[in-house]
Amino acid sequence: AQSVAQPEDQVNVAEGNPLTVKCTYSVSGNPYLFWYVQYPNRGLQFLLKYITGDNLVKGSYGFEAEFNKSQTSFHLKKPSALVSDSALYFCAVRDSVSGTYKYIFGTGTRLKVLA
Amino acid sequence: EAEVAQSPRYKITEKSQAVAFWCDPISGHATLYWYRQILGQGPELLVQFQDESVVDDSQLPKDRFSAERLKGVDSTLKIQPAELGDSAMYLCASSLGLERINEQFFGPGTRLTVL
């Protein structure tokens, strides 16, 4: 079955420091991977996706993600964190096997950037 | 910028009452998703439409939940009767189509509280 795991419930980082939010995946077939961000009482917003090609994917708001096939990981990164980056982050994988093409989300990681 | 619209934003109801949520996807988006998100967790797919057809409703509690997208545009999700455990955020999302590996666009959600 397709799945993603986010091993950290919360990540704390000081403003200006680099941040990493971890995601590992388990898929049959090609991995199509996504990151979304959710602010309080709001829907999810798309940050970036990996389909194929370059292992370093750049996205919105200065975020990037590194796809690592051997480690089955897709970690979200940002070189310099902002207080406004504090939010809930979700990794997701698109099911490419069952024929429904549905998206499966991780449990989320709360990022807290400290001033 | 086009957005997914949802209403109401908040709904408080008593156990055993009926509730309904409405979603209007971005124009031209063939695929529409309804998710349930329990506080602090990732979204869980309830039902997925491609135009007016249901693609996946395997996680929809069909004894009490129903969803329709009659003309392949807007959609309604209904719960009858509501139970205490239904308290959650209900998110609607849309995307261009199943064949494309596109991101989903989410609405602001409806927060349901069942008393």
Image: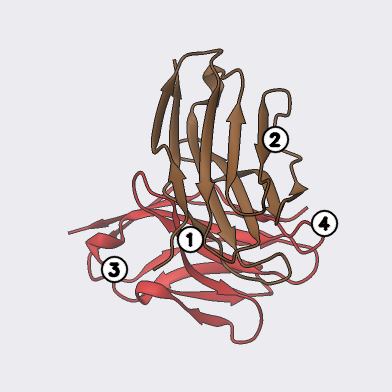
**Residue nearest the observer in this picture, A49 or A21:** A49
Q: Are marks 1 and 4 in contact (CB under 8 Å)?
A: no
Image location (x, y in percent) of residue B35: 58, 44
**What's the image's color scheme?**
by chain
* Residue A98 marker: 4
Report the chain holding disc 1.
Answer: A
Q: Is residue B91 above or below residue B78?
A: below
Q: Which residue is mark 2?
A: B60
What type is the residue that disc 1 sits on?
Tyr
Q: Secondary structure at mark 2?
A: loop
Q: Determine the CA span between mark 1 and mark 4.
A: 23 Å
Chain B drawn in what color?
A: brown
- Pair 4/3: label in front: 4
Image location (x, y in percent) of residue B108: 41, 48
Q: What is the crowding at mark 3: few (fewer than 14 residues within 10 Å), some, or many (at least 20)? A: many
Chain in red, by letter, is A
Q: Determine the CA span between mark 1 and mark 2.
A: 23 Å
Q: Determine the CA span between mark 4 and mark 2.
A: 17 Å
Q: Earlier in the sequence, mark 4 or mark 3?
A: 3
Q: Which residue is mark 3?
A: A81
Q: Which residue is mark 1?
A: A36
- The residue shown at (67%, 41%) is B68
Q: Residue furthest bottom?
A: A54
Q: Secondary structure at mark 3?
A: loop
- The residue shown at (61%, 21%) is B80
Q: What is the crowding at mark 2: few (fewer than 14 residues within 10 Å), some, or many (at least 20)? A: some
A87 on left or right of B71 = left
